[in-house]
Image (cartoon, helix red, strand yellow):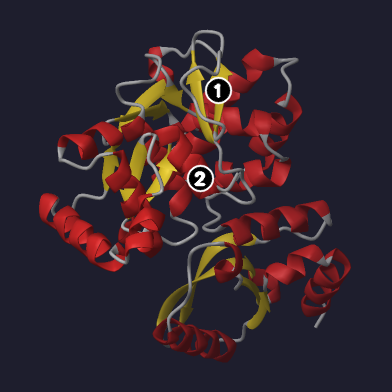
Amino acid sequence: MTPQSSFFKHDGAANATSQLQDTGLASAADLALTVRFGTAFTAKRVVWRTGQLCDAGFGSRAIGRLVANGELVRLRYGCYVRGSFWSSLSAAARPRHRILIHNFATLNTSPAGFIYSHVSAARLHGLYLWQADEFIHITQSGKPSGIGFGKDTRVHSRALAREETTSISGVRLTTLERTVVDCCLTMGYKQSLILTDHALRLGASMGKLLVEAAKLRAHRGIRTLRNVLRNADGRSESPGETLTRDLMRELLIELPELQLWINTRLGNHRADFAWPHRRLILEFDGKGKYFDYRPTDEAIFRERKRESALIEAGWTVLRIEWKDLFNEAAFKTRILAAMNR
């Protein structure tokens, strides 16, 4: 069964578009429906429950046609988003919006008391995520039954203390510290380290994290959590910097100073990694490959001027990219060679 036919089955809408095509009225009917839809709602309105559309005069057949012509996108059972809005979102932005739309869609139908947690809480907090799943994770105190939740939802069972929860724009989720712990217990080491570095940078308490880790002793994933807390450093400003720092640790390379300010003729500049006694700087340049970021031409020009000023001041600048992090031998050779110049 195709996704479109599945939609019509669940929402009870017949294939009105094909019926209109048989009478030669499809284009006129769809245009009239689109105009009516545009008149019924302001352009700022981007999400609806089925009941809200029905209350505005759009029955199941009309909703089906609006989905077919792209005016609406059905993201989950009984919930629709404006097609132009959804298509305008980047691939990196969509997972977070799915959570917000899930919260909107389940407001009146889900079991009471669930909290967004794990990867979903991380997205709502704006934490860096690398190769994370796109499921919607929620935590509730009762035993997960699956009733009222879709296939895109992962339900975790745990009683959360009041101080372990917070809210962002009315959406209930776990705190930064609880989110870090949950993710470290269920994700891989490098994924967890990236997330934890960013959480510390945003103000998460290392003291609270260590206290929570001490409570867990034999819990599944505790080894990853402890290793992450041992090696985490909130001074790293990007996932690439986190992985670069940790790779140097693994390869037993002399650890550099992080975010060192260096004075040049163009002013003070901050280096990602620096060995002052060697006059060596290591910069990570791979932000754009895995994350929703692209440097502008102006930013690239400023970076080149900055590098020229550092070189004039007697520093060697070594640049690495994402691909370098996955060729450990070459990575180590380049850094050691630069150190021994």
Name the residue located 70 percent from the left edge and 47 percent from the top edge. Answer: 190
- Looking at the image, residue 24 sits to the left or right of residue 231; the answer is left
Query: Is 75 located above or below residue 284 in the figure?
Result: above
- Looking at the image, residue 295 sits to the left or right of residue 316; the answer is left
Image x and y of residue 23, in percent: 32, 62
Mark 2 surroundings: few (<14), some (14-19) or many (≥20) residues within 10 A = few
The one of 157 and 20 positioned closer to us in this rendering: 20
Query: Is 55 located above or below residue 327 in the figure?
Result: above
Give the residue at the far right of this rendering.
329
- Number of numbered discs: 2
Find disc 2 in the rendering and name its residue: 5
- The quadrant the N terminus occupies is top right
**Residue 283 visible to an observer of this rendering:** yes
Name the residue located 26 percent from the left edge and 50 percent from the top edge. Answer: 46
Q: Which of the two discs, 1 and 2, labels the residue nearer the N terminus? A: 2
The one of 204 and 120 positioned closer to us in this rendering: 120
Mark 1 surroundings: few (<14), some (14-19) or many (≥20) residues within 10 A = many
Image x and y of residue 83, in percent: 34, 57
- Looking at the image, residue 189 sits to the left or right of residue 177; the answer is right
Give residue 155's mark. 1
Name the residue located 39 percent from the left edge and 20 percent from the top edge. Answer: 110
Image x and y of residue 192, in percent: 64, 41
Query: Is 147 located above or below residue 19 in the figure?
Result: above
The span from disc 1 to disc 2 (Cα, nearest Å) is 28 Å
Amino acid type for the residue under numbered disc 2 = Ser
Query: Is 2 located above or below residue 119 in the figure?
Result: below
